Every structure is written in C-alpha cells, then in structure tokens.
Amino acid sequence: MALTGVENLAKLPELKQKLLWTFLLLAVYRVGVHVPVPGVDAGALADFFETAKNTLFGLFDMFSGGALGNVSIFSLGIMPYISASIIIQLLTVVSPELAKMQKEDGAAGKKKMTQYTRYATVLISVVQGFAIAVGLESMASPTGAPVVLDPGLGFKLMTMTTLCTGTIFLMWIGEQITGKGIGNGISLIIFAGIVSGFPRAIINTFRLLGAGELSVFVLLLLMTLMVVVLGVIIFVERGQRRIPIQYAKRM
C-alpha cells in the first residue's frame, strides 16, 4: 500500500528539517514586519494609509506584506535586491567584462556577480531609505497630526540605516531558505508577504457583500477572471515547443 504524504514526511528527516527551517525563517520575517521604525507616530501613520489604501501606496504595501503601512524595519522588503539583480543582468549585456565573468569564470564568476548584486542592493536601499525618511517627514494624518515625532537629520539617518539593515537581513533570510530550506527564498518571501493580506481581503469582501456595495454577480465575475488568469499562467509556464533535431549518421 502506498504511503501517504504525511507518512513519507515522517520517514524523511532531512525534508522535515528543511521544512522547519523554511517556516522558521518565514516566521522571523513576518514578526519583523510588525517591528516599527523608531520616531514614527503609529496612529497618525495608520490614519494616513487608511485614506491611501486604494492608491499606489496601497499596492506597495501589499507587496511588502503590510511592512510599508507599518513603516517597519522591513518596509523596503526584498525589492531592492530584485532591482539590483535586474540592473546587474542588464549590465552584463553592455559590459564585456561582466559578460565574460558570468559565462567563462564558472563558480568564481558567479560568486563575484552575487557580491556585486549585494553591493548594488545596499546602495539602492540607502537611497530608497533616505527617500522614505524624507517622505515620512512630509506626511500628516487627515486630522493634521504629523507622522514623524521629531523630524530632522537624525531621524533621516536612523531611518535610512534601519531600512537598509532590514533589507540586508531579508536578503540573508532569502539566501538561507534557498540554501538550507525548500524552494527559492526570495520568491517565498514575496509570496508570504502577498498571502498575508488574503484574510483581510476576504473579510473586506464579505463586509462589502453584506453592506450591498459589492454584488454577487461582480464577485463571481472576479473569481472567474482569477481562475482564467491562473489557468493561462499555468498553461504558459508548462508549455513546451518540441524541436526535431536530426543527427548525421556515424559509422
């Protein structure tokens, strides 16, 4: 009789260890999302984001798993690392040295590319952290209460350092999940951030249905579109193009 998935898991201690390591690191990430940056009025910030939840701020907050709305230490998320990776990959097209390093140097070249990506991540995090600090100082709640309690150079430097450190720590978590856990760590961090907003979205959907602001027909239409889009994505990802190859006969 075939073993079930749970029985197989019990007989594979290495798999259990990888799952435990993955869930533990993701739990650390979710706890860090709720650790705020010092010097910010949480009440005034919550009021501001309540009025901006349907704007671009709300979209960024969703991809950060709620970290941006809380102005937590993980507010920048893993996006600076992704941006740095894209920039380095584009530079390999225009830079012969980077292209040679990527193709010919093997493991050593890959290690150098990873190192350059980390340096670029730190640079991007510093710039974005400073921009967020400046933006926070200009924000105020709908009642006029300032978001930053004590604005100035000290707050800018502290916020910039905190957010940059948070991104570096997230990058380390992603690398640890990739190396010792299951799957790609960066992708799992992004996935965990988006999924964390699902319960709130479901509750809001039922609230809108109960208040009559959302009809059942529109809800069914949205669910149908989601299923269709998911099916198309799976079809494209699993698609194959078979190319016949003819070899010359050899004696």
Image (spheres, rainbow, N blue to C red):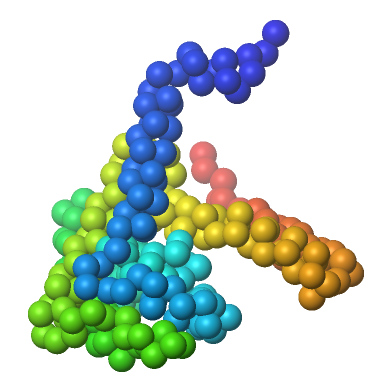
Q: Is residue 86 visible?
A: no
In front of the other: 193 or 152: 152
Q: Quadrant of residue 214?
A: bottom right
Q: Quadrant of residue 170?
A: bottom left
Residue shown at 39% from the left, 31% from the top: 20
Instruction: Examine the rendered structure and indicate whether residue 60 appears above or below residue 32.
Output: below
Q: Position of residue 231 (x, y in %)?
A: 74, 58
Numbered-mark total: 0
Q: Position of residue 99 (x, y in %)?
A: 26, 71
Residue 62 appears left or right of 149? right
Q: Quadrant of residue 183?
A: top left
Q: Residue furthest top?
A: 1
Residue 48 appears left or right of 25? right
Q: Is residue 76 visible?
A: yes
Residue 244 appears left or right of 80? right
Q: Position of residue 86 (x, y in %)?
A: 35, 73
In front of the other: 233 or 242: 233
Residue shown at 67% from the left, 58% from the top: 203
Q: Quadrant of the N terminus?
A: top right
Residue shown at 25% from the left, 67% from the top: 37
Residue shown at 38% from the left, 44% from the top: 27
Q: Residue furthest left?
A: 154
Q: Position of residue 232 (x, y in %)?
A: 72, 63
Instruction: Examine the rendered structure and indicate whether residue 100 appears above or below residue 19.
Output: below
In front of the other: 250 or 90: 90
